[in-house]
Image: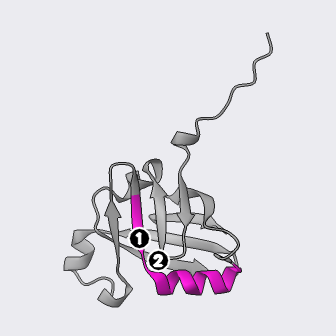
């Protein structure tokens, strides 16, 4: 027998960038279950998008300016961060053309030490 075993794509952590939001699949949402806000960041040189969960304690201690907080909404099978202006900046920087493609999907990893989800664009 020579089976070729497939991977479980449902278990893969992915994010999808749409014209008006970033959507995380259920597997990626596990890192954001206990938060309502995140930080969004770009590393232009490494071509990476970072999403950092912000805890209630972080908010209460004013660790991050409120202007940097982005709301994350969690559904049963997805998470969504809506911020059209951020997506426009992202699209311009990384040449994402939403007239040609409806969305852009990326696998993500979670840096446990820095508590940041990273997508390699």
Q: Is residue 113 visible?
A: no
Residue 24, position in %: x, y? 47, 59
Residue 94, position in %: x, y? 69, 79
Query: Which residue is rendered at x = 19% and y = 78% of the image?
Result: 60
Q: Which mark is residue 40?
A: 2
Query: Which residue is rendered at x = 68% and y = 77% of the image?
Result: 97
Q: Is residue 88 visible?
A: yes
Query: Which residue is rendered at x = 64% and y = 34% of the image?
Result: 7
Q: Secondary structure at mark 1?
A: strand
Q: Which mark is residue 11?
A: none
Q: Earlier in the sequence, mark 2 or mark 1?
A: 2
Magenta stretch contains residue 67: no
Residue 6, position in %: x, y? 67, 30
Query: Which residue is rendered at x = 56% and y = 85% of the image?
Result: 88
Q: Which residues are magenta?
A: 79-95
When asked about the image quadrant of residue 64, the answer is bottom left
Q: Are marks 2 and 1 in contact (CB under 8 Å)?
A: yes
**Viewer-nearest residue: 110 or 87:** 87
Q: Secondary structure at mark 2?
A: strand
Residue 29 appears left or right of 102 = left
Residue 26 appears left or right of 121 = left
Identify whether 38 is placed above or below 105: below
Question: How many numbered discs, if any?
Answer: 2
When asked about the image quadrant of residue 119, the answer is bottom right
- Which residue occupies the extreme front position in the image? 99
Other-residue count near label 2 (Cα within 10 Å), few / some / many at <14 / 14–19 / ≥20: some
Residue 91, position in %: x, y? 63, 81
Q: Which mark is residue 81?
A: 1
Magenta stretch contains residue 90: yes
């Amino acid at each position: 027998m020579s089976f070729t075993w497939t991977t479980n794509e449902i278990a893969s952590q992915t994010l999808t960038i749409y014209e008006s939001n970033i959507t995380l699949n259920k597997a990626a949402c596990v890192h954001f279950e206990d938060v309502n806000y995140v930080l969004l960041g770009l590393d232009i040189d490494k071509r990476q998008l970072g999403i950092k969960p912000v805890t209630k304690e972080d908010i209460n201690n004013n660790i991050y300016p409120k202007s940097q907080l982005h709301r994350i909404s969690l559904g049963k099978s997805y998470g969504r961060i809506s911020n059209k202006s951020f997506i426009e900046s992202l699209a311009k920087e990384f040449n994402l053309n939403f007239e040609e493609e409806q969305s852009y999907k990326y696998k993500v990893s979670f840096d446990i030490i820095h508590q940041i989800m990273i997508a390699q664009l």
